[in-house]
Every structure is written in structure tokens, then in C-alpha cells.
Image (cartoon, rainbow, N blue to C red):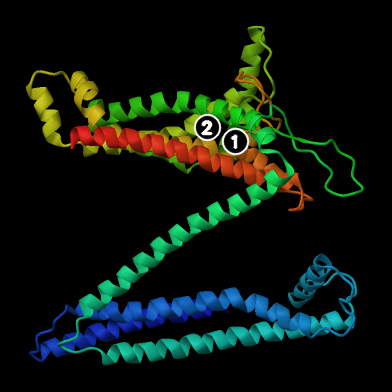
Amino acid sequence: MTALPFLLLILATLAGYVLNRMAARTIRDKGARLHSMTSYHGMFSALMVLVPVLTVILFWLVLEGPVVDRMVMSGLPDGATEGQGAGAVQLVLAEIKSISRGQIFGTPEDWKMAAAERYSALRARADWWMVAVVSGLALAILAFARSRVSAEFRARQGVERIVSGLMIFCSLVAIFTTIGIIVSLSYETIRFLDRVPLTEFLFGLNWEPQIPLREDQVAAEGAFGWIPVILGTIVITVVALVVAVPVGLLSAIYLNEFAPRKLRAVVKPVLEILAGVPTVVYGFFAILVVAPAIRTFGQSLGLDVAPNTALAAGGVMGIMLVPFISSFADDALSAVPRALRDAALGLGSTRAEMMTTVLFPAAIPGIVGGVLLAVSRAIGETMIVVMAAGLIAKMTINPLDSVTTVTVQIVTLLIGDTSFDNPKTLAAFALGMMLFLVTLMINVFALRIVRKYREAYD
């Protein structure tokens, strides 16, 4: 039933476009001079239908579930959920929904069966009401848009206003989403720092957030020094960049300037396929192939190599990052004006000298953007680290040892039997805030480099 309103929306949007365009074409065929092209008249009707009706559908879908749940729970018999906590009430509601879908386990009480029937009836009624509202609203807007068609109607300006409003709305969503993330991280970080001293978090050398989550549990006091976690992140990121940056840049330079056209047409798409491989596949490759190979080779040299190592995780992560750096660098090199290439070659430079002294420095802003994207991916990667590097935070820079990263610890802290009223869970938000600040400093540094070279070559 949920697909029906969207189908009606698509049909109404297409109908509005066709009807208004045909009406505008009829006016033009009669000899009148239209202010706007017929396609703008069609686009005006299509956007007038699409935007408000889609908004209504999305809001309806968001509010329908909570409203129906509240109506069902309010209709339960007296004493059905009396004295139960919020978790138990949610379990009752989940059981009622399961019964309504036909997933019955055991012999439910009669009042649950009745509640399930009422739930199904309310959802069906709400879905039909949504179809009716969408149909009525679409027809009303279609009639209004059709009435606006005339030779003097400024359809192009109307389309531009709607598109401009959509762009402003999307920009505001991005801005307020960023603000919301910062506010939520800041609030939870402050709650964490109320329980753990700031100096211990920033300068502590131990990360062992194993504290009692319930009164009946026995656990250590816990240590929340984030330095081992960020150190592991830095080690893996450095290993990944040592692999990815040279390979990515050199492959981009070769494909852009030196490779034959036929070879480039084959190699570049194949290289970019690596960007579409799921990270879990890289993780399997790291733990099943790379890590055992590194351990075997290290033992043959008499080195003590852990089963999970930062070198295995970082090396495979570097392979994953190669297409990002290579693609950005190739696009940046291609965007350099042809006049710079020709001038350098005309002055007697070889192609290698032209690349190193003119083309590459001029493309630095785009290349830095690709490297920055690779750094962000390396810092935020989780799956490869979980599978190939480990979960234990250690004060080490040895790439042959097992380490962990900030993102892995955030995931670990927020799964399982957790509560938002203890330092262990709140530590995930503190780590997220520190990761946000580190990424922000990297962005600021990269922007300064980009601005410096852009001013030199503008």
C-alpha cells in the first residue's frame, strides 16, 4: 500500500507536465506569443505537484507509525501494561505488531489478538486516507497549475523560484544537520567529562573502558585515556597513505601523460573498480591472505608478528584508497590549461620536466583534495580494522603489532547491553568529538595548501 501513493505522485507529475505543455502549445499554435517556452509550462506544473505532494507523503509516513502505535496502546484493557517499564511496554507493542503480521508464537492472550486486529485495521485505514489525501491534493494542484497557463504567464520564473527554493532548503538541511551533529556530540561529551576528568581523557595512556553496567556486574574501574586509540588510528592511516599516495599519484601521472590512449581506456576503468568493492571484502582479503602472509614472512626473518597487525589493515586499506587518489589526481591534471603544457614543451622541456615543474604544481589543489578524501576514508574506516587489526588499544607505533582505531572503539562501545548513563557509553561520543576536531584541523590545513597554490597559478 505504501507504493501506491508514490505511484500516484509519479502519474500526477507526468500528467501535469504533459497537460500544461500541451495547453501552452495550443495557445502558441493559435498565434499567441508565449512569454516562456512550452517546456517551462510543463515543468512548472510538474514541480508544483511533486514538491508539496511528496512532502505530504513523507510527513504522513513519519507520523503514521507513532500515531497508530499510540492509539493501539491507549485502547488496551486496564491493567494490561500497568506497572511495567518502558522496555516491557515496547515488547508488548512489538508482539502485537508480530501477531498482526501473522507471526504468532505460542498462544497469545485474547486482548493481544484484539489489539493486533485493531492495529491492522488502523494501519489499513491510515493507508487509504493517505491515498485519498494524495489524490485530492494532486488533483487540486493540477487544476490550479492548469489555470495558470496563458500567453503572459512567466512559467520560467516560476520554475526558477521553485528550484531555487529547493536548493536553499537542501543547503539549510545540510547546515542544520551539521549543527545538530556538533550540538549532540558536544552535549554528550560534556556529560562524559562530568564523570571522567578532562586531563585523564586527553593525556591518559590506558584505554580500558570496562566498568560495571549494572549493579550485579563486577568489572574493573576503567581507564579512559584516548592516546592509545588515536595512536592506533594514526599508525594505520600512515601505513595506508604510504601505500596509496605514491601508487595513486604515479598511476595518475602515467595514465594522464605517458600511457597510450588504448591502454588508458582499459586501465582507468579497471582501476576505478576498486572503489566499488565493499570494505568487508577488503577485510576478508586482509585477514585471510595479507595477514597470514605478513606473519609467515616475519617469522622467517625472526620477527615477532601478531596475528592481527596494523600493517595488514593499513596495506589493504591503502589498496582501497588508490582509486580515490588516482581519480582525483587524474582529473586535476586534466583540468590544467593546455597552454601551460604547450608553453613548457615549447621552451624545450621534456614531458617529464613539464610534468614535474609545471603540470603537477598547477594541479596541487585537486590532488590535495583527493589525498584529503583518502585521509578521511582511512580515519573513518571500521570494517577492515575490526577484521585485520584487532580491538585492543595499545601504546605502540609498531606496524607489526595489533592496534585499534577511534571508529572501531565507537562501534564497540555502542553495541550490546549499554546504557547512556555511564562513562563507557558516553566515551563513544567523546571519541567522536575528538575525531571531528582532528578531521577539522586536517581540512583547515588542506585548505591553506590549496589556497596557496591556487593563488600562484590563477
Name the residue nearer the viewer: 260 or 452: 452
Q: Is residue 270 visible?
A: no
Marker count (numbered): 2
Return the residue at label 1: 384
Residue at the spot 70% in from the left edge and 38% down from the top edge? 197
User: Residue 112's quadrant in the figure?
Assistant: bottom right
State the SS at label 2: helix
Residue labelled with disc 2:
317
Q: Secondary structure at mark 1?
A: helix
Q: Amino acid at mark 2?
A: Met
Give the crowd class for mark 2: few <14, some 14-19, many >=20 residues within 10 Å: many
Tell whether 30 sits left or right of 368.
left
Outermost residue to the top: 302
Q: Marks 1 and 2: CB-CB under 8 Å?
A: yes
The amino acid marked with disc number 1 is Ile
Tell me if residue 137 comes above or below residue 364 in the rendering.
below
Q: Give the percent coordinates (x, y) of residue 235.
A: 56, 25
**Dividing the image into 4 quarters, which one contains the N terminus?**
bottom right
Q: Position of residue 398 (x, y in %)?
A: 61, 18
Q: Is residue 104 toward the left or the right of residue 374 in the image?
A: right
- Quarter location, residue 230: top right
At which x and y percent is residue 214? 86, 49
Residue 147 makes an appearance in the image: yes
Residue at 61% x, 28% y: name it. Answer: 232
Using the image as rendered, state which of residue 329 and residue 357 is in the foreground: 357
Residue at position x 27%, y 75% in the image: 159
